[in-house]
Amino acid sequence: MGTMKAIQFDRLGGAEVMELREVPVPELRPGTVLVKNHVIAINYGDTFFLRGTYLVKPRFPDTPGMEASGVIAAVAPDVTALTPGMRVAYIGMGAYADYTIIRASRVMPIPDEMNFEQAASFPIAVLTAWHMLHTCNDTKPGEFVIVHSAAGGVGIAAVQIAKAAGARVIGTVSSDDKIGLVRQFGADWVINYEAEDFAAQALSLTEGRGVNLILDAVGKPTFEKGLRCLAPLGHLILYGRAGGAPGPINPLELFGKSVKVSGFAVTMMYALADHHRRALDEVFRLEREGKLTVPIGGRFPLAHAAQAHRFLESRRSTGKLLLIP
Ligand SMILES: NC(=O)c1ccc[n+]([C@@H]2O[C@H](COP(=O)([O-])OP(=O)(O)OC[C@H]3O[C@@H](n4cnc5c(N)ncnc54)[C@H](OP(=O)(O)O)[C@@H]3O)[C@@H](O)[C@H]2O)c1
């Protein structure tokens, strides 16, 4: 089918290992579709993939990227539920390119009214936020929820989904310039966790009772403190480690307040068809009702993927960063 532009890398490292190259358009395999990418969303996990520390390991030369939206260009003969011309979003490797081959089960048709930017932003960030609040936890009105890194891609979605559930949301950020955005998207309180002790503040905001749920992808700097400010029966979900892996926990420490710690990986949810379907329906409903919009913190041409990665790693970015092929 000719050639296309794609980002490739052939050694582990930071943003500098990425190069824009002209490569053959990949070929369909059984059970896959070819998607013409319109908007590619960047995830923090892409920085781990480049360094070789992500769940999936690169095979050189490899193409980074794990979610995008676009239009189906071709389908393998054994794929019957999807047809060329469908507007879709997907989660799957190799998204930093004009075209990507994706397993049909990882492709989601998108509602007519949803634009490609919002569509590119939901397969990972929004579904991660939704599943943590509603599949892993049963978040109820009036409960206190801490969302760490609340201005980021997952964080700003979690703030809105928690508010839609009626929860009281405490967002944390590492610099004051992100506070306004997190408030604008509905957080009741925003704490700069670099400048202040978020656990002490959360205890004081809850009159000593503690919070019901903590969504933590920072890890080492926030995990132990988080355990200290959980309410009885509280729940901490660890879903990332941008600030380094937390140390081991002593399970006996969970006894006193009957709290639980769990982990989450969105890639697992795609195999659980009922959970996945329900999450999609709910997320599309929230978007339709105007209760959930992912702010776009930057749009970069595909060729500037390295610049976009540096911005994401600088901790200055907010919302989702997008690549436009
Ligand atoms: N388990 C899953 O299924 C899953 C799915 C998606 C994402 N994640 C994880 O969720 C987190 C957010 O992902 P995202 O794609 O939405 O990214 P993001 O939040 O838009 O950007 C990363 C944010 O991490 C925070 N951070 C904390 N310590 C950091 C450090 N030492 N260096 C760099 N950043 C640091 C920064 O916000 P502050 O400085 O304001 O805290 C930064 O803005 C990541 O850790 C990612 O790996 C997990």
Image (cartoon, rainbow, N blue to C red):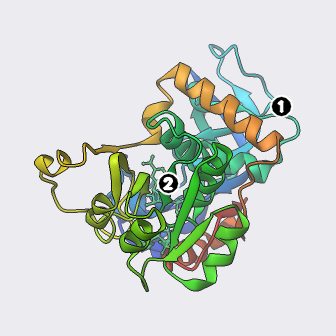
Which is nearer the eye, 165 or 57? 165
Q: Of the two numbered discs 1 and 2 on the same chain, state the one appearing first in sequence.
A: 1
Q: Secondary structure at mark 2?
A: strand
Q: Write down the residue under mark 1.
A: 85
Q: Secondary structure at mark 1?
A: loop
Q: Residues within 10 Å of mark 1 (few under 14, many from 20)?
A: few
Q: Is residue 28 visible?
A: no
Q: Amino acid at mark 1?
A: Gly
Q: Amino acid at mark 2?
A: Val
Looking at the image, which residue is at 59% across and 49% down? 167
- Badge 1 vs badge 2, beta-carbon distance below 8 Å: no
**Which quadrant holds the N terminus?**
top right
Q: Is residue 69 placed above or below 184 in the rendered structure?
A: above
**Which quadrant holds the C terminus?**
bottom right
Looking at the image, which residue is at 39% across and 51% down? 239
Task: Give the percent coordinates (x, y) of residue 50.
Answer: 41, 62
Task: Give the percent coordinates (x, y) of residue 194.
Answer: 42, 82
- Label of residue 145 in the image: 2
- Label of residue 40 in the image: none
